[in-house]
Image (cartoon, rainbow, N blue to C red):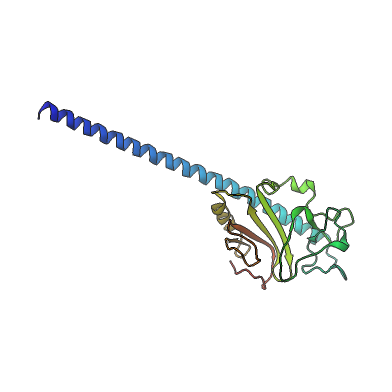
Amino acid sequence: MTAARQRGSIIIYILIAIFLAGLLVEMMTQGATKSASSSQIDAIVMELQGDIKTIHAAVDECAVTYQTPLTGTPGNPNQPFPMYCANSGCALSTMTSDGTSSITGTTLPLVGCPGAPAGEKLVFPNAVAENLKLLDDTSNYNVTYITDTNDGILLRITRVGTDPLWSEAITRLAGKFSACAAKVVTANPDALNYNCSGGCLYYWILRKPSTVFSCP
């Protein structure tokens, strides 16, 4: 083999080695990125699951502690669970719920316990909100408490803005709960006439057979 051919062969081998090294680096980088993303999603799922359990426990505490059904006005479709407060004063006479259409729900700070004494009706005072890891951050998450005749009591959790991890996070999160306790919805509008194109997680505290959502 001539010297020229030898040099040519060496150059080819060097180029192949460089190509393979670059390919290996790319594969390792992609693997590390995927691993980091998966770890981030796991962390989001764990904290959201903990927050949902905290909210559920606070709602149950109202229903268990103050079990006496209300009579007259306001009517509660899901006695003795919380209703909606008109404001932070949360007077019993102004409490409401949703009927069978135009479901709007309310934010956590305006969820009230009908049977609680005056001045203690708010289900989520600051002490409870401070125990939330993610869902107290209203700049990044929306949490809507819904109580209505057909669907029972449910939470709708959405992400403010865009997050490439959100869809996978709520899909994994829904799988953490028992069948029919949680559902991921991406319709616009969804069954409650809400825009869930960015991904909504619905979680039932009390589910009725008449709910407009299929199971699971």
Q: Position of residue 1 (x, y in %)?
A: 9, 30
Left or right: residue 82 compared with residue 39: right
The residue shown at (20%, 30%) is 10
Q: Quadrant of residue 158?
A: bottom right
Residue 145, how many percent across, how many down? Answer: 72, 59
Residue 10 to residue 138: above or below = above
Instruction: Name the foreground residue: 187 vs 115.
Output: 187
Image location (x, y in percent) of residue 9: 18, 32
Residue 137, percent from left and from top: 69, 46
- Could you tell me which residue is drawn at 65 percent across and 62 percent down? 194
Q: In the picture provided, is 143 more to the left or to the right than 74?
A: left
Quadrant of res 26:
top left
Q: In the rendered view of the protein, which quadrant contains the C terminus?
A: bottom right
Task: Name above or below for residue 148 compared with residue 135.
Answer: below
Report the residue at 87% width, 58% height from top.
91
Q: Is residue 131 above or below residue 10?
A: below
Q: Eyeballing the image, is 54 above or below 180?
A: above
Q: Nearer the viewer, residue 89 or 169?
A: 89
Side (left or right) of 46 relative to 90 = left
Q: Which residue is the extreme one toward the left?
A: 1
Question: Number of numbered discs present?
Answer: 0
